[in-house]
């Protein structure tokens, strides 16, 4: 369809990928994003909050995040695309894989879902549990699940006992936190873009992306407690309060920058446009959202265009001949009717 349209307008044909969310309305997609983000944040924040019972290990948190992402993506990916993360939505928009008009609504739906999950976790914390972990109250306990750097990084908390012995605890600087969050988010969004591209022929995309998230959480945990997702950081800060609000900006800006870098890298190898099929300076509007990829279709564009032109010329010739025959028949009939009978 796209090749015929491009040929009729003098544009070289390109291969077009339909988006998987085209058949679903905006409300359905927003509800899917809210539900999926709810499940993801519930797993990560819930496991991190009660992680004291596991000795503070990161592996349970990483597995909870990765596995729940697999489930949430498998459940809602066909409806909304399974972004579940503002950085992913931003990266997909920059890469031409989703419409810019959906970015803000998706972000709001993700914030609602993630904050609701944090509210559920906060509400079920027993009143006596913070004291068992050495926290003053539920908000202080929740700060252990928040993202932070410097003296609030997980490594700084683990090495705090060194200060009591006259040593210096280990702390990561702000720039180290920025670098880590940008890199791990860029890797995550880049793998998301590649694994969900329709021409990749990769069926277990949820498993690939979920395992990637698991590994990246483990990598970033010592430095920042592994955000990779502005919603995950915001949802905890709403209830943790205190120092978390002062450091929240980093966990909003850095993941978005990482998502943008991944999108630009993706476009360098697979340039795409939303709603258009374009080559060079010639653009043909398709009227719908597409993932436009040049995968060799251009090599046969001349043959397709020639075939289309020949077919169009043949149809026009046949049409003209048919019209001429009909006109001749009508003239003959008119002449016959106009003549008077001869004796």
Image (cartoon, grey):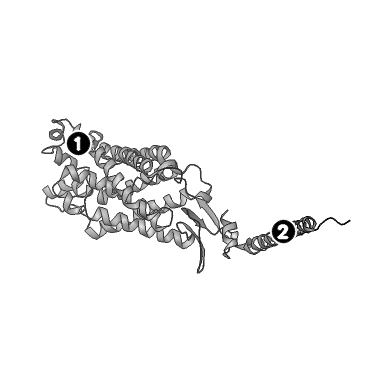
Residue 199 on image: x %, y %: 53, 51
Residue 15 on image: x %, y %: 56, 56
User: Which residue occupies the extreme right position in the image?
Assistant: 343
Q: How many other residues sit within 10 Å of disc 2, few (<14), some (14-19) or many (≥20)? A: few
Circle count: 2
Determine if residue 107 is in view: yes
Which corner quadrant of the image does residue 46 belong to? top left
Q: Earlier in the sequence, mark 1 or mark 2?
A: 1
Q: How many other residues sit within 10 Å of disc 1, few (<14), some (14-19) or many (≥20)? A: many
Locate residue 176 relative to residue 282 in the image: left or right.
Answer: left
Q: Disc 1 or disc 2, which is closer to the eye?
A: 2
Which corner quadrant of the image does residue 266 belong to? bottom left
User: Which residue occupies the extreme front position in the image?
Assistant: 343
Which corner quadrant of the image does residue 260 belong to? bottom left
Locate residue 339 relative to residue 189 in the image: left or right.
Answer: right
Determine which residue is flagged by label 1.
122
Locate residue 296 relative to residue 343 in the image: left or right.
Answer: left
Residue 252 on image: x %, y %: 26, 54
Q: Quadrant of the C terminus?
A: bottom right
The answer to which of 315 and 102 lies nearer the viewer is: 315
Locate residue 72 relative to residue 338 in the image: left or right.
Answer: left
**Residue name at image x 53 percent, y 47 percent:** 201
Which structural element holds mark 1? helix
Which structural element holds mark 2? helix
The answer to which of 192 and 36 lies nearer the viewer is: 36
Q: Which mark is residue 297?
A: none
Do the numbered discs 1 and 2 sit on residues whose CB atoms are within 8 Å?
no
213 lies above or below 338: above
Determine which residue is flagged by label 2.
323
**Residue name at image x 56 percent, y 59 percent:** 14
Q: Separation of disc 1 and disc 2 at Cα?
A: 78 Å
């Amino acid at each position: 369809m796209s090749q015929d349209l491009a040929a009729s307008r003098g544009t070289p044909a390109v291969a077009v990928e339909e988006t998987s969310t085209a058949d679903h309305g905006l409300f359905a997609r927003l509800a899917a994003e809210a539900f999926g983000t709810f499940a993801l944040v519930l797993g990560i924040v819930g496991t991190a909050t009660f992680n004291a019972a596991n000795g503070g290990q990161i592996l349970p948190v990483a597995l909870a995040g990765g596995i729940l992402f697999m489930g949430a993506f498998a459940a809602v990916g066909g409806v909304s695309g399974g972004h579940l993360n503002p950085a992913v939505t931003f990266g997909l928009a920059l890469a031409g894989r989703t419409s810019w008009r959906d970015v803000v609504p998706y972000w709001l739906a993700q914030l609602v879902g993630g904050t609701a999950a944090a509210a559920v976790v906060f509400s079920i914390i027993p009143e006596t549990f913070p004291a068992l972990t050495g926290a003053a109250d539920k908000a202080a306990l929740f700060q252990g699940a928040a993202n932070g750097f410097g003296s609030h990084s997980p490594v700084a908390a683990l090495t705090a006992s060194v200060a009591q012995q006259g040593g210096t605890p280990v702390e990561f600087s702000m720039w180290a936190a920025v670098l880590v969050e940008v890199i791990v988010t860029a890797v995550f969004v880049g793998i998301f873009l590649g694994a969900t591209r329709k021409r990749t022929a990769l069926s277990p995309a949820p498993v690939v992306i979920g395992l990637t998230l698991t590994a990246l959480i483990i990598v970033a945990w010592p430095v920042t407690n592994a955000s990779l997702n502005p919603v995950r950081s915001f949802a905890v800060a709403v209830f943790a309060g205190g120092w978390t609000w002062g450091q929240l900006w980093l966990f909003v800006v850095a993941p978005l920058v990482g998502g943008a870098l991944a999108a630009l890298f993706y476009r360098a190898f697979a340039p795409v446009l939303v709603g258009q099929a374009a080559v060079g300076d010639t653009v043909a509007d398709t009227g719908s959202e597409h993932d436009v990829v040049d995968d060799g279709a251009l090599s046969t564009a001349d043959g397709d265009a020639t075939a289309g032109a020949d077919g169009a010329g043949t149809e026009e010739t046949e049409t003209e001949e048919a019209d001429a025959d009909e006109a001749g028949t009508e003239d003959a009939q008119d002449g016959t009717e106009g003549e008077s009978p001869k004796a």
